Image (cartoon, rainbow, N blue to C red):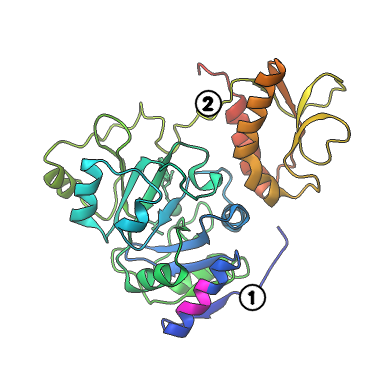
Amino acid sequence: TSETQNTIRLSATPRGIRAAAGLLRAGELVAFPTETVYGLGADATNPRAVASVFEAKGRPRFNPLIVHVPDLEAARKIARFDARALALADAFWPGPLTLVLPLAEGARVADLVTAGLPSVAIRVPEHPLAQALLREFGGPVAAPSANPSGRISPTTADHVLDGLSGRIAAVLDGGPTGVGVESTILGLTGDAPLLLRPGGLPLEALEDALGEAVATDISGDITAPGQLKSHYAPGVDLVLNADVADAGALWLAFGPLAGRRGLSLSERRDLREAAAKLFAHLHAIDALAREMGVSRVLVDPVPDHGLGRAINDRLRRAAAPRDS
Ligand code: TXA
Ligand code: MG
């Protein structure tokens, strides 16, 4: 968007940490150091705050985000841990390991964090400032790397400001990060552990701790980034950019419904609101269509700029043929 703000640099002091936590509580974006790279943090329970992460990064699609918590106890409120997950958390947390686990019943994270998936990526960072911020904030923090989409991940506060100054509220300056590459991401939602992204924790260390091999071929795995073609497809057919006048049709509107049947992503055509509501509305419109016995949903055009690009990407995937 055209919104700009003054990005403040907060010091690694109790006062800086309190200010950072206060901004997160207010729904603002705060970059903070982890031992891997700087993350762009948002309150993971606040749909609008999470939507603005994608906006600030200029991400053309809604990749799911990693949820950061201070310890295993907090993690267990968000994800379901089996024996394997507990063993790995015990061995490597806090540290550069992200686990993809089934979402816990009643987990309070915005749909955009998981991109509507039944799984969640969760991590307990070791960096003392990240730890202090997470404890002071007291809730889960969703954070991708704090760089504009397509640029390399930042390892200093100056890198963060180079890329995102004017687009985020603050950066908590903890100096250069230690590890410098992102966390290793391990998927534990299937039969075998699956390496979804190599990173700061070596594969060998994981296999040693697990006492079993870790699969590394993600080509058949739907949860891996980039493999998500029609995964979010609802049961009904979505007709994108619809401009027909069909009195009986069910609509997913962008803007006022104006007498049409259906749901609006945003009555006032606000892309951030539409992004925040997208996954919940896709689920709801599917249920509504079933209830009404209709097999297709007409979708208003969504402007293809800013967050609209990510919304359209996701709508296209949701509309893609099921068997592709
Ligand atoms: O070191 C790191 O992991 C940094 C620091 C800030 O913690 N974070 C980071 O986040 O690298 P990001 O957003 O750049 O990468 C997150 C990756 C994405 O590739 C995403 O697709 C994957 O994690 N991911 C997140 N949730 C997932 C899920 N439920 N299933 C599969 N992959 C998931
Ligand atoms: Mg990244």
Are there few (<14), some (14-19), or many (20+) residues within 10 Å of tag 2?
some
Mark 1 Cα-neighbour bin, 10 Å: few <14, some 14–19, many ≥20: few
* Earlier sequence position, callout 2 versus callout 1: 1
Snapshot quadrant of residue 8: bottom right
Residue range in magenta is: 17-21
Q: Could you tell me residue 93's position as x and y percent?
A: 25, 58
Pointer 2 residue: 230
- Number of numbered discs on residues: 2
Name the residue tied to disc 1: 6
Which amino acid lies under the numbered mark 1 shown in the image of this protein? Asn
Q: Position of residue 321 (x, y in %)?
A: 57, 18
Q: Horizontal and vertical percent for residue 90?
A: 20, 54
Instruction: Tell me, yes or no, whether the highlighted magenta stretch contains residue 20.
Output: yes
What's the residue at 83%, 26% (across, down)?
Answer: 243
Residue 193 pos. (x, y %): 25, 36
Dominant SS of magenta comes to helix
59 vs 288, nearest the viewer: 288
Tell me the quarter of the picture where residue 241 sits: top right
How far apart, in angstroms, are the residues tagged by discs 2 and 1? 39 Å
